[in-house]
Image (cartoon, rainbow, N blue to C red):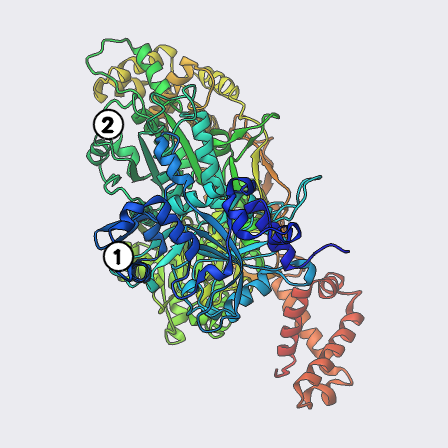
Amino acid sequence: MHSQTNEQALEAAIEKALTGTCLEDMKKQGQSIDAVNEQAALYRSGNGYYIGQPSNFNPQFAIDEQFFWDFLETTQKEELEKLLNQSDWKLKILNRLDRMIKKYGILHLLKKGLQVDDAHFTLFYQLPLASSSKQVKENFAQNRFSETRQLRYSVDNPREEIDLVLFINGLPIVTMELKNHWTGQNARVHGQYQYKNQRDTKQPLLQFARCVVHFAVDTDEAYMTTKLNGKNTFFLPFNKGNKHGKGNPELSKGEIGHRTNYLWNEVFTRESLANIIQHFVRLDGKKKDPIQSKTLFFPRYHQMNVVRKIIADASRNGVGQTYLIQHSAGSGKSNSITWAAYQLIETYPESNATPGVTDLEKPLFDSVIVVTDRRLLDKQIRDNIADFSEVKNIVAPAYSSKDLRDSLEQGKKIIITTIQKFPFIIDGIADLSDKRFAVIIDEAHSSQSGSAHDNMNRAMGQQFDEEDETDAQDKIIQAMQSRKMRGNASYLAFTATPKPITLEKFGVKDAEGKFKPFHLYSMKQAIEEGFILDVLANYTTLKSYYEIEKSIEENPLFDSTKAQKKLRAYVEQHQQTINTKAEIILDHFIPKIVNQKKLKGKGKAMVITQSIESAIRYYKALQNILKDKGHPFKIAIAFSGTKKVDGIEYTEADMNGFAEKDTRFKFDEDEYRILVVANKYLTGFDQPKLCAMYVDKKLQGVLAVQALSRLNRAATKLGKKTEDVFVLDFFNSTDDIKKSFDPFYTATSLSEATDVNVLHELKDVLDAVGVYEWEEVEEFNTRFFNKEDAQVLSPIIERAAERFIHDLELEDEDKADFKIKAKQFVKIYGQMASIMPYEILNWEKLFWFLKFLIPKLPVRPDGTDGLDELLESVDLSTYGLERVKLNESIGLDDSESEVNPQNPNPRGVHGPGEDEDPLDLIINSFNERWFQGWEATPEDQRVKFISLTKSIQAHPDFQSKVAENSDQQNRDLAFKRILDDVMSKQRKQELDLYRLYAKDDAFYQAFFDTMKRMANVSG
């Protein structure tokens, strides 16, 4: 007989894993279900489930009556006896249960129990904690976990069945529709279709919040939903990921089973399912809202997995650990952070040997501090945790140092603050060295890598006693130790785009010395699973080309590299240039986004510019064009502070006509379609209606990923798809963008630790210049750590600054070189001090001295070294744009990426010998770089276009097949043949032009349209 490869075989495999046997095996052995369940201890060799019978299911109340009554009679006989004198006591309990589930949902009853008259029934005994009593552990063992196959769930149609249902104490928790790839069906299509179209969701079992979750499962993949809503049901993948993408990994060699084994072997075990119900599942919404308007949250696999791994690691390894969680946008970070924070306050140590343990009966952490960069998330996490927690008043926001201090002293378990507030409110906190903390940092970026983080460390550590007479050296060592990651805190950093310093500070070091994230949910998996869109799928770059003419005769000498940079900035910021680009933007946005009603007519765009001045110029250019078009929609601008352009001062509020704090909400309104920005809103801004982005700014590394990821938010209700997302980039090449995205597409690891020895080199160079004497550094530190008045410190710094400015007679480049190296020393030391395995006092002293000295060191900006003269000597005569890559999909490298540590070489301004070029050469090389391909001047181009047009019009077929032809399609075909003919005859004289014409599709299309217009062919 051949192998069983159908759905029944998958059902049997799941049943056997859960119960230790299956109906097919029992049939062969002549056993009955009741006999097996009576000897449950023998047959629970699987995951401890009982086998249920479809005949025991009551579809009206959606319960398994056998296990429901058996549980109550065995565990709560005294409570039942309070009702036994009533003739219809069973019906009374069931009606009350039904009414309460319809009002509050099954989750509420599993947690709170059921009150009937003066009897109170516990419907589910909670999973014990490590410190729980023997009674609590015995109670949990009394729960009846059961599974029933081919469950007839419908009151109206008794023949309708669901493949598999999991119950706890007779109450349904999970339904499953199973498919088997080998029968040509799968979960993603056929399983979901069955739930959406062939299951009656009006039946009690399938009503919202009656059952916790519904799974469509096959041998390879699993999908789940908490709300069945007919054709509008939304399923989420519940897969582990495969090679950083969607799906599940293949089983390791020698292992038997299916790729979805983890569901029944890991997720649906009794302990795991109980843990999910108690600590993950959440019904979101206000108490007074009807249940249908609420949202039931069930974790995705990676969310459940990361939280469990963190908790297990903390129990085993105790306090003082670091965790880097690299989770892409679309991973549901705010829920993961909520679940982690809530569960960390209930984490108990595994043994007395666990670091930071004072008592096995006490939780490992006194408080969990959530530090978030996003103001909106601040409230979201606070509400989530408050809503999730059964114990009220354990969550406190910290709005000031007093709030934070009071919260910690009152023993608040979860404290939410923002990175903006944290550095300012720490200084006044009392000595908390005897407390243990878990610090969860949302979007861990450089704001956590430097001094703000050091302040946090100082707050978590020892408080300096002002009366203490310790000398300056001891105080410096105390400061250094407080800037270490303290032993009384564990740090958890959540980010999609870890920088090298973040990897080094929070990552896990492997055997090869590489730093890797503790847990990964990659951008590749998020894109493939449909949680974010691939912003690089439709990427168009436009390279600017210019003709710059000399307006003076002489050829002054200029530094070539700086001149190129300066020239490009000059051209790109010119109003004439911005007007051209504004036209191109609206020529795309209005027909392609607005008129095509992208995102159900709600599609929006962002214009990213180089500077606030550019943003203001773009805004004005776009407004002028929209005015001519009759203001079809509104646009907004976002920038901080006040900016003077052409003698007029501007602010964001003045230009928009509403307060700065309202910009994000106004932009969400339908009448606002474009937002112009420079740096604001490039990170942490979620606007799912964004579908186009026009980039006129250098984007690289983490900023490129963060900025372009504003587009990737899915908007299922608006039907947003990958093909709706469009980027038009005036500035960067596709290679630049690929280089930026590759490291974050899958896993990011740091190739090696930053070489702190660079600090030795930098200090040697800085010492040798003579700006400061070492005695001054010593004196400054002594006075600084003795908290002497700033007036005492100031003369020491001023003495060094005076040497720098005048006494040493340094050249401008030497001054710039010193300042760059001083900044580099402060940055690297500030970031590395908290993870360095040893302490070097002189580095710490120099760090504090330079921190105060650097602002006092003026350096002439490189714009003044003759380059301003260059800008006066050139004029912008023509500005054009050539499409280089049209709607190109940028393919990312899905192998794991390594990033290098911080540049370990001391930086400076001295290049490899600067080449001074006359103005003519600079202009020529500039035009060669940006005037792409065709080397003709604008005048030459005009002559050539006219000449080619005459040749086309003189062609023997032109009059009859083009000019007098009314069929547009045939006319275009004829014109194409004539143009091909003319161009092939011209190829020798116009080799460059012909090469572009023949090989570059984008150039060909633009050229074809131009020639058609020149020849007056209407189209």
Q: Is residue 701 above or below residue 482?
A: below
Residue 701 visible: no
| Foreground of the two, 626 or 516 | 516
Circle 1 or circle 2, nearest the eye: 1
Tag of residue 823: none
Q: Quadrant of residue 747?
A: top right
Q: Quadrant of residue 800?
A: top left
Give the SS element for disc 2. Answer: loop
What residue sits right under mark 2 in the picture?
A: 429
Q: Are marks 1 and 2 in contact (CB under 8 Å)?
A: no
x, y percent for residue 555: 57, 45
x 30%, y 61%: residue = 656
x 45%, y 35%: residue = 310
Give the SS element for disc 1. Answer: loop
Q: Is residue 590 left or right of residue 45?
A: left
The Cα atoms of the two marked residues, 1 and 2, are separated by: 37 Å
| Foreground of the two, 976 or 482 | 482
Mark 1: which amino acid? Lys
Q: Which part of the image, by quadrant, shows the N terminus?
A: bottom right
x, y percent for residue 905: 55, 26
| Foreground of the two, 947 or 703 | 703
Q: Is residue 225 above or below residue 469?
A: below
Mark 2: which amino acid? Ile
Q: Is residue 357 above or below residue 882?
A: above
10 Å crowding of disc 1: few (<14), some (14-19), many (20+): few
Q: Earlier in the sequence, mark 1 or mark 2?
A: 1
